Image: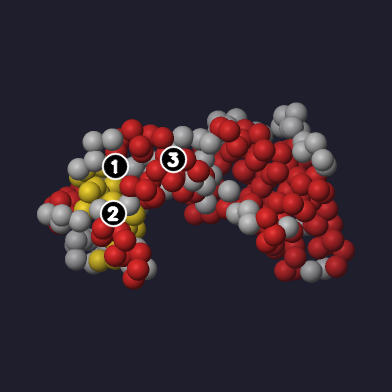
Amino acid sequence: MLAHHQQTIDRLTDHFRADPTCLALIIGGSVAKGLARPDSDIDFVLVATDEDYARRAQEHAFQYFSLDFSDYEGGYVDGKVIDLAFMRDVADRGSEPARFAFKDAIITYSRVPELPELLAQMTQYPEAKRARKMQSFYAQLQALKWFIGEAEKRRDPYLMTHVVADMVLFGGRLILAYNRVLYPYHKWFMTELARAPEKPENLMALIEQLLANPCQANADSFCDAVFDFTDWDEPPEGWPSRFMVDVEWTWRTGFTPIADW
């Protein structure tokens, strides 16, 4: 960790250690994950008492931003305020992005003895949901392979752009799930995908080619590489039915949109 990042974290920790409504301070983001640039900000999570969190909930005051703790160019702190119930919910049923947010997190101050164990539970890959997710991601990729043909036939740049982005997303998510790697949401998606130990040898090059030149030929090359990588477990009801339930009918079932799983 760079010295100016550590200095900012030390100041932030000293500030909240003196606050009786603060149970713990957790550093996350690029600094905690070893991906920071010199001008990266400090992302953190403040664990508030139940009483303070309830007050904040009434005011929707869950965000904290300040320029006061950093003295380097581009520096600032950007935090979220949660409570222990939030953390237990992440451990029990959190989405992969919610879990990834706490991956490699650094506890700089805590009055909660069980916090390290809770963090470990929060950042586990959700194994119980893995098989179902992989079937759904497979169905998405099959559907998108059909849509890419429609985009090319119609010469529709909007549909082409949308489909290609989703194609990379769900093809990549299949590979992440195969490796039991948490999906980090869009900002760090390519980083985590490139780090995945088991994947088609030319996957990242095929993604670059598809994004730079969206067309059916490049889409087919990408999809074929993913489909041929292993003997995927397909949805037993077929990909059209799975796609319909996961995408078109979520308004009725109340499911979280598949892109956010």
**Which is more N-terminal, label 3 or label 2?**
2
Q: Which residue corresponds to mark 1?
A: 106
The numbered mark at residue 50 is 2
Asked if the residue at tag 2 contacts the one at tag 1, i.e. Cβ–Cβ closer than 8 Å, the answer is: no
Residue appearing at x 73%, y 48% in the figure: 140
Residue appearing at x 47%, y 40% in the figure: 92
> Can residue 106 be spotted in the picture?
yes
Binning the other alpha carbons within 10 Å of mark 3 as few (below 14), some (14 to 19) or many (20 upward) gives many
Disc 2 from disc 3: Cα separation:
18 Å
Q: Which residue corresponds to mark 3?
A: 91
Q: Amino acid at mark 1?
A: Ile
x and y percent of residue 61 in the render? 33, 67
Single out the mark in the foreground, 1 or 3. Answer: 3
Q: Is residue 8 left or right of residue 139?
A: left
Residue 77, placed above or below residue 167: below
Binning the other alpha carbons within 10 Å of mark 2 as few (below 14), some (14 to 19) or many (20 upward) gives some
**Which is more N-terminal, label 3 or label 1?**
3
